[in-house]
Amino acid sequence: MTESASGTASGGTLDEIDRKLINALQGDFPLVPEPYRQVAATLGLGEEELLRRLDALLERRVLTRFGPMFQIERAGGAFVLAAMRVPEAEFERVAAQVNAFPEVAHNYRREHALNMWFVLATATPQGIAETTAAIEAATGLPVFAFPKEREYFVEMKLRA
């Protein structure tokens, strides 16, 4: 295994500390004033090293996102699953336009007539219609919104 100057494994490999870090950050994140310091201590690391390794994992795209998951409705906001029918020749351009909206997450391609699917998260329920209209204006394509009918809790943890 090759170590980089940052102390994390380079390329597509992870060193044992990175593995422990990834496994430790997938749940039970402490709700304390200095959570990274607490997690670092449980791993035998300093807080700065933990943060440096986390940044390196994000930069290398080993991790694509690190952050909390909120039930936005409890804070007065809204989620919706949305889809678009995007001509293949325009897919990358439209994906860039859609992804430029901060309300968009989890944009992915499907082999289906509706070939682009993403999640919209807005601070208010009215924000869904506003963002949908803005995406339609930017792309020139209709957005089909599929509001949540029922919520399920599915916890998935991947062992590194």
Image (cartoon, helix red, strand yellow):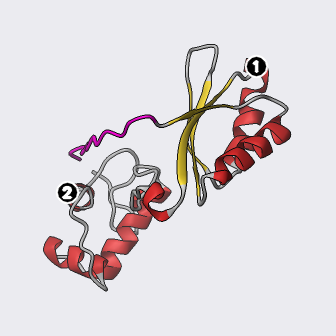
Q: Amino acid at mark 2?
A: Glu
Q: Report which residue position mark 1 lands on.
A: 87
- Where does residue 15 sit, x and y in percent of width and height? 25, 55
Give the overall secondary structure of the magenta segment. Answer: loop
Badge 2 marks a residue whose secondary structure is helix
At 47% from the left and 55% from the top, the residue drawn is 73
Residue sitting nearer the eye, 135 or 97? 135
> Is 65 on the left or on the right of 98, as rendered?
left
Span shown in magenta:
149-160
Instruction: Please tell me whether residue 46 is drawn above or below residue 50 in the rendered image.
Output: below
Which label belongs to residue 16? 2
- Where does residue 31 sit, x and y in percent of width and height? 27, 75
User: Residue 97 lies in what quarter of the image?
Assistant: top right
> Is 44 on the left or on the right of 14, as rendered?
left
Residue sitting nearer the eye, 66 or 129? 129
The residue mark sitting in front, 2 or 1, is: 1
Residue 124 colored in magenta in the image:
no
